[in-house]
Image (cartoon, grey):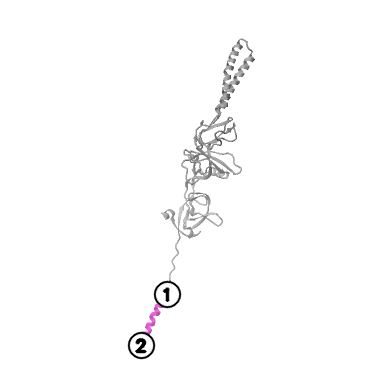
Amino acid sequence: MQSKLKPVVLCLGIPLILLTAVGCVKKSKPLPQTPEVSVVFVRPERVVITTELPGRTAAFLIAEIRPQVNGLIQKRLFTEGSEVKAGQVLYQIDPAPYQAAYDKARANLPALKLRVDRYKEALVEKAVSQQEFDDADAALKQAQAELETAQINLNYTQVTSPITGRIGTSSISDGDIVTAYQPTALATVQQLDPIYVDIPQSTTELLRLRRSLEDGRLNSDNTNQNKVKLILDDGSAYPLEGELQFQDVTVDPTTGSVILRVIFPNPRGVLLPGMFVRTVIIEGVNEQAILVPQQGVSRNPQGEATTLIVDADNKVQQRMLTLERAIGDKWLISSGLSLGDRVIVEGIQRVRPGTSVKVVSFNSATN
């Protein structure tokens, strides 16, 4: 009987040993990985600071054409919308009454001049009195003045353009009666090359710019300070640069702004009076500007700008920022960062202040 029971004991013992061995094996937990972030180093940069302001075009010269004598318009001598030259005749007023007045004044002049010459000789011989000579001489001068006036009025029957430019629509037609210096202009001529762009600038911006220059945060760019670029209404850039002419000294009480006037060349007539445009004006140069990619800046629930940096121990810290303006895809930082700081621009979602991180360069991460 003992020989029969021995194999049974051996068979039951083997599974028991296997179960014990399996139960002793424990699963090891994976070690936590250090999050990886991409950073940029804060370094000073030389940046030309510009500001974009809306503006409106205005003609360089404007002349409203009005008659200087009364009369009937015989002929309009220009094509509406065309280019006219200074001195070009635009309208012809009936000259007949003015020609008659001129001829009459001219006809009286020789007799009066001869009379003065005779009185002058007679005065030497005491044949006439000084009073008689003075009366004759005064009559001659009056006749000469009347002749000159008649000549001027006759010339005014040809209504000319005082400037070279583009003429608009005519408010009258042939056969209309006009009066001297009437309130309604016959037509308007505008010189469009060059052309003005008037730009309103708020006094707040003006004071900010002055403080920046006084504090040394901005330096004047003497070479390009007065150069202005133009962006048209369709978003395209105007190919020619303008030059800042002057800044008005009076603040508009309704808008709280002053007017900057810029002059632009306009050889092809692309710019027309009354167009709304955007201008890019150079404020100055910041020699020590701190720029941070916009993706590295966020805002807390209070709306304050913040960023995350990596300190010397490769731990994350939060910094509060003061933003001045956006320049391209970067923020210009006024305060909150120091030179050499490492600003996190990628991997922000995986870290929080106090987290240890592995740092890689932002440039190498994007290549």
Find the residue positioned furthest to the front: 175
Residue 300 versus residue 264 in the image, above or below: below
Task: Identify which amino acid the numbered label 1 is placed on.
Answer: Cys
Q: Position of residue 81 (x, y in %)?
A: 51, 38
State the CA–CA distance, disc 1 to disc 2. 33 Å
Find the residue positioned furthest to the top: 125
Element carrying mark 2: helix
Question: Which stretch appears magenta?
Answer: 1-21
Q: Please tell me whether residue 5 belongs to the stretch shown in magenta.
A: yes
Q: Please tell me whether residue 6 belongs to the stretch shown in magenta.
A: yes
Q: Position of residue 126 (x, y in %)?
A: 62, 10
Find the residue positioned furthest to the left: 3
Q: Main secondary structure of the magenta part?
A: helix
Q: Earlier in the sequence, mark 1 or mark 2?
A: 2
Q: Residues within 10 Å of mark 2 (few under 14, many from 20)?
A: few
Depth check: 311 or 288 in front? 288
